[in-house]
Amino acid sequence: MIDLRSDTVTKPTDNMRKMAYSAEVGDDVYGEDPTVNLLEDTAAEMLGKEKALFVTSGTQGNQIAALTHCKPGEEVILEANSHIYLFEGAAISALSGVQPRPLQGTRGAMNTEDVRNAIRADDIHFPETSLICLENTHNLAGGAILPLENMQEIYQIAQENQVAVHLDGARLFNASAASGISIKEYAKNVDTVQFCLSKGLGAPVGSIIAGTEEFIAKARKWRKRLGGGMRQAGIIAAPGLVALKENADRLVEDHKNAQTLAEGIANISGLKLENTVETNIVLANVQETGYTSDEFLDALQKQGVLASRFGTHTIRFVTHLDITKEAIEQAVAVMTRVARVQ
């Protein structure tokens, strides 16, 4: 089966399994797991932040950030199609008790003047703006890279208004691999950042959040409150270290495969690309084939290809370390056959 549903479906590499087996461990709730500590220190150094914290998932990382930055009754500015707003079960309201204020962006990037104007004035009728959330790369925009200039301008506006900025960088390493901009340079333009070890980097589980030492001390307590305090977690942290050391540079291969896939789709009658492919996500519209996305996906699955529904007629394909160029060519051949049937 050629699985293009997500880069979360990757299997641990042989070296990840070996390092998990031999990992030195301790009780991480007491701060005594040396492998977790090494992972956190390594990530903090890579991001240029004082401290980092190993968490179970990107969603948990984003929600811990909101809980640490915000108080109930405050407001968070974010892009209208962001993962935090659409795909985290309204957790930002359910857990932090804050009101989201979504702004419609372009390819995931909010207009800087819209952000400036959305920051609340000091008025008894309004909630206080406590946080601005960015997403890089932007999932629903098809893996679009948030321009560094956009991040810089928003961060400047935030600082002028004493508002914190958090980056949902679940696929930040993809943005860096495609743009040539270091993750440290991206992270410099936000107060806190989250990235996933379990997407393109290929680890089986976990994410990192990073910020100041004071922020991480508070975040650690929120992780405990959410049941995220893990014990001998070095077993799952060790693959994360391997991911950082061995898999960051190879993300360009996923991007090349995504480009190959996009070129193949563009040549299939009835299929239309919906995004400019910058990283590892390809969005295709199947409406002209006469299929709905569900019908097209069912037909693909019967011929050994898996992908994800992204709308009534939109399908998402995601390349990752378990997908080869040959697998892409096979997937394109299957899509060509399926499109012709209807």
Image (cartoon, rainbow, N blue to C red):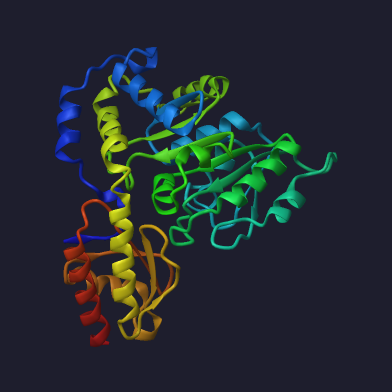
Q: Residue at x 53, y 42 (%)?
A: 167
Of the pair 291 and 3, the residue shown nearer to us: 3
Task: Look at the picture and state if 23 lies above or below 138.
Answer: above
Horizontal side, residue 338 vs residue 132: left or right:
left
| Residue 266, quarter of picture | bottom left
Whether residue 295 is visible here, answered yes or no, is no
Q: x, y (%) of residue 200?
A: 32, 48
Q: Position of residue 267 (x, y in %)?
A: 31, 81
Which residue is painted at 55% across and 50% down in the image? 85
Is residue 324 shown above or below 247?
below
Q: Position of residue 123 (x, y in %)?
A: 85, 41
On-image quarter of the N terminus: bottom left
User: What is the x, y in percent for residue 120?
Assistant: 78, 44
**Residue 224 appears in which quarter of the rendering?**
top left
Residue 205's quadrant in the figure? top left
In the picture shown, does residue 41 fall above or below 120? above
In the drawing, does residue 130 fall left or right of residue 15? Answer: right
Query: Is 245 located above or below residue 335 in the figure?
Result: above
At a point 24% along the width and 73% down the height, the residue shown is 332
Nearer the observer, 330 or 290: 330
Residue 113 shows in the view: yes
What is the quadrant of the C terminus in the image? bottom left
